[in-house]
């Protein structure tokens, strides 16, 4: 059974009536920006531990992620976790919330989400390899191949060496 999606305006009304908003994103995403009323309960923890906190006792639970995609993909799990409760998904996630001029807490002192850091680093290294391969020596095209192979490995195995490396950077240490 899939969970029904509802608009930002409907979420606002349900929150006024006592609904609990659950953010299923990862902690690094939540710390960077979140909806003030939302409780963080990452999808990975929901799978292993179930609903916790206010959401466990609420009659109405609304889930959200960044764009709504993760919550839609996990709708069967979320439905199972909320058996006996009314459950909804915020259509469009926090992106739609912001597009509807609803407030969020943005903490620019927190680093960008890890996947965005990986995308920036991979894109930068690939561009650098292409420019150096064109301007200096074709040997530098190997950098593009190395980054591409790393991304392929990350996508197929779930292990991202670049994310592991970036986690050691000073801006990611807390």
Image (cartoon, rainbow, N blue to C red):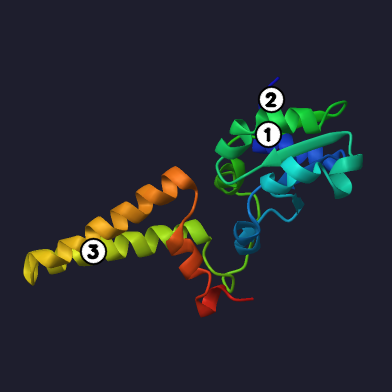
Question: Residue sitting at 28 percent across and 65 percent down?
Answer: 125
Tell us which disc is closer to us: 2 or 3.
3
Give percent across and percent down for residue 36: 73, 56
Along the viewing direction, whichever of 70 and 35 lies nearer the viewer: 70
Tell us which disc is closer to us: 1 or 3.
3
Q: Secondary structure at mark 1?
A: strand
Along the viewing direction, whichever of 13 and 133 lies nearer the viewer: 133
Q: Secondary structure at mark 3?
A: helix
Residue at the extreme top of the image, as rendered: 1
Give percent across and percent down for residue 96: 57, 42
Which disc number belongs to residue 68?
Answer: none
Q: CA distance from mark 2 to mark 3?
A: 46 Å
Q: Earlier in the sequence, mark 1 or mark 3?
A: 1
Q: Secondary structure at mark 2?
A: strand
Quarter assignment of residue 72: top right
- Of the 4 image quadrants, the one containing the N terminus is top right
Give percent across and percent down for residue 155: 43, 46
Residue at the disc numbered 2: 4
- Of the 4 image quadrants, the one containing the C terminus is bottom right
Vertical side of 59 occupied by 129: above or below? below
């Amino acid at each position: 059974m899939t969970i029904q999606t509802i608009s930002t305006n409907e979420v606002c009304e349900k929150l006024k009536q006592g609904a609990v908003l659950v953010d299923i994103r990862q902690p690094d995403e939540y710390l960077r920006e979140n909806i003030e009323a939302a409780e963080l309960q990452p999808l990975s923890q929901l799978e292993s531990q179930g609903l916790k906190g206010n959401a466990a006792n609420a009659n109405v639970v609304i889930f959200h992620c960044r764009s709504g995609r993760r919550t839609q993909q996990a709708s069967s799990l979320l439905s199972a976790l909320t058996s006996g409760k009314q459950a909804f998904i915020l259509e469009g996630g926090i992106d739609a919330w912001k597009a509807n001029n609803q407030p969020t807490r943005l903490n620019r002192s927190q680093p960008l989400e890890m996947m965005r850091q990986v995308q920036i680093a991979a894109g930068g290294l690939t561009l650098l390899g292409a420019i150096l391969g064109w301007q200096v020596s074709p040997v530098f095209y190997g950098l593009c191949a190395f980054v591409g192979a790393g991304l392929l490995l990350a996508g197929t195995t779930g292990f991202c060496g670049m994310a592991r490396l970036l986690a050691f950077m000073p801006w990611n240490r807390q």
